[in-house]
Amino acid sequence: MIGRTADGSGLCATCCGTDAPATRCAGCGQTGDLFDNGQCPRCVLTERVRDLLSGDHNAVPDHLQAIADALTSAENPYPVLGWLRRSPSAKALAQLAGRAEPLTHELLDALPQSTTTRHVRSLLVVAGVLPERNEHLARLERWVTHTLPALPGHQAIVIRPFADWHVVRDARRRAARDRYSNAAASGDIKDIQAAIRFLTWLDEREQQLGSLNQEEFDYWLTSYPTQRVAIGSFIRWTAARRLTSPLELPKRGDAFAVNFQTADEYDQQLRRCLNDTKLPREVRIIGALVRLYALPVTKVTEITTDRFHQDDTGSYLTIDRHPVLLPPRLGQLIKDQIAQPRTTTRMSRALDEASPTCCPATSPTAPAIPAGWATC
């Protein structure tokens, strides 16, 4: 209401006639707040998205229309307008839109792999511009592709088949079963790095791999104690192919736990996860699942929304292959988490609902890495 009639009742802008204040959008003609140049926020957003993604053309290319629709259909246009103005991801998206070649994963792989590049890739995947892929496997393959050409020739002869036919091949098999995680990729990279470091050590001693004996290998293990686990994969591989004689590897064992919680402390933290509304909802969910079902944090952060369901008997979460009955309060927390639109990416509800993980990070397609989560 912007005015009153003679009898004192409210009068809207439409009923004020020709003398009404100029509150109609010059673009769509709707009444409301004007944002810029006589246009409402929605019309301004549509124009700025078109300018961002059109490149040298007058219109958004067909292959980018999906991301344009996702941006312009945001329930609240103001956060997206701020994202377009300030975010490095928006600037990177504009640069990609201006390139002549089509957008592909290979094109993004050729760019520096910064946080911005990874975020833009995630937006394009969720919007349907790029196909989904296992980014952990892609990270390993990209690292191998960039690392191996820099090796000396005599090292590459050994490292390349180990990396390509043993490490990457096994990673692809696990990725095909959807069982290849960020931690697995990091472990595989460390295995290859340990193999390179080991061959470099042999070069410094002017020693051949084929003449390696147990005493010399033990000396290397003593000199590089942090590589005791990582080198195992390479030594087993070389022994199986008779590149070295059979060597005894140290037994892998974790250190004994020294800090224990009492039952009361454990119960107190569980109650806090279930009841403390001051904690972020994601932290409450992860903390409760860890304490109730002894799940590793890496497994909890990769739980997808399709593993949760409710029926007349209660709320269930499928862990591996088995549905587990959840306490009512935890079930409600997970239900609220899935229903809540994402706010960190400032994108539309369509992108929020497409996120596959129950507790997503700022990247729409990836879970938060374990190191990024606080504990309650």
Image (tube, helix red, strand yellow):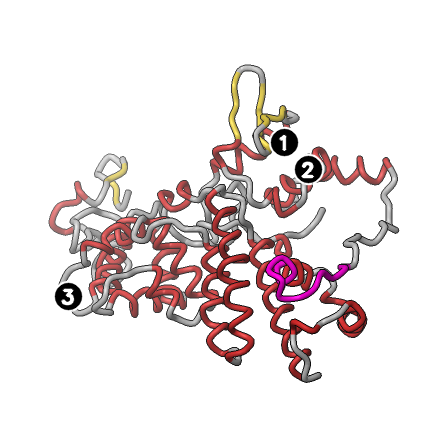
The quarter holding residue 302 reads: top right
Q: Which residue matches tag 3?
A: 57
Under circle 3, the secondary element is loop
Under circle 1, the secondary element is helix
Amino acid type shown at disc 2: Ala
Q: Which one is earlier in the sequence, the residue at label 2 or at label 1?
A: 2
Image quadrant holding the N terminus, namely: top left
Tell me how far mark 2 sits from mark 1, CA to CA: 7 Å
Main secondary structure of the magenta stretch: loop
Residue 221 is covered by the magenta coloring: no
| Nearest to the observer: residue 358 or residue 135 | 135
- Label 3 crowding class (10 Å Cα cut-off): few <14, some 14-19, many 20+? few
Residue depicted at 78% across the width and 74% down the height: 223
Q: Which residue matches tag 2?
A: 288
Q: Which residue matches tag 1?
A: 330
Residue depicted at 24% across the width and 56% down the height: 64
Tell me how far mark 3 sits from mark 2, CA to CA: 52 Å
Residue depicted at 22% across the width and 39% down the height: 5
Looking at the rendering, the stretch of residues picked out in magenta corresponds to: 237-249
Asked if residue 71 is positioned above or below residue 340 in the image, the reply reads below
Amino acid type shown at disc 1: Leu
- Label 1 crowding class (10 Å Cα cut-off): few <14, some 14-19, many 20+? some
- Label 2 crowding class (10 Å Cα cut-off): few <14, some 14-19, many 20+? many
Q: Which one is earlier in the sequence, the residue at label 1 or at label 3?
A: 3
User: How many callouts does the rendering have?
Assistant: 3
The reply to whether discs 1 and 3 touch (Cβ–Cβ < 8 Å) is: no
| Nearest to the observer: residue 205 or residue 143 | 205
The reply to whether discs 2 and 1 touch (Cβ–Cβ < 8 Å) is: yes
Whether residue 374 sits left or right of residue 169 in the image: it is right
Outermost residue toward the left in this view: 18
| Nearest to the observer: residue 107 or residue 329 | 107
Q: Locate residue 167, reporting x and y percent.
A: 54, 58
